[in-house]
Amino acid sequence: MVDDKNITAAVRTASEFVAAHGKPARAVVSRLGRAGARVVLVGADGAIGDLVVADVDTAEAVVAAVADLEAHEWDRETTDAAKIGPAHRRRMARR
């Protein structure tokens, strides 16, 4: 079920990401089970971001609502577009 308040916040966050990291940006939606769905954002500059929403329907609605955000899968072009540098690897290792 899509919650308007949550989708508004997610759309704002994704729009800010696109504005900061270039367009077009890519979005990959993944189910997280009962926890909801994850939207991984890959900017035109290779930056990676993500957001977690209630479900896949909400995630897909967010992607559709953001200008210059294109739905993708983890295909070769998307993985090549993502730039994972040493700082990101260190940050993820601390989690």
Image: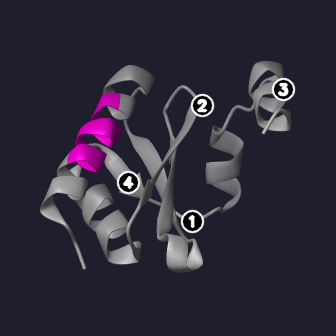
* Mark closest to the chain's N terminus, 2 or 4: 2
Q: Amino acid at mark 2?
A: Gly
* Residue placed under numbered mark 3 in the picture: 90
* Residue placed under numbered mark 2 in the picture: 46
Position of 43 relative to 7 (above/below): above
* Mark closest to the chain's N terminus, 2 or 1: 2
Segment tinted magenta in the rendering: 9-16
Q: Amino acid at mark 3?
A: Arg
Mark 2 residue element: loop
Q: For mark 2, does the 10 Å Cα neighbourhood hold few (<14), some (14 to 19), or many (20 or more) residues? A: many
Q: Amino acid at mark 1?
A: Glu
* Residue placed under numbered mark 1 in the picture: 73
**Residue 18 placement: quadrant:** top left
Mark 4 residue element: strand
Q: Which of the image's four quarters has the C terminus?
A: top right
Position of 46 relative to 64 (above/below): above
Query: Is residue 67 in view?
Result: no
Nearer the observer: mark 3 or 4; the answer is: 3
Q: Main secondary structure of the magenta part?
A: helix
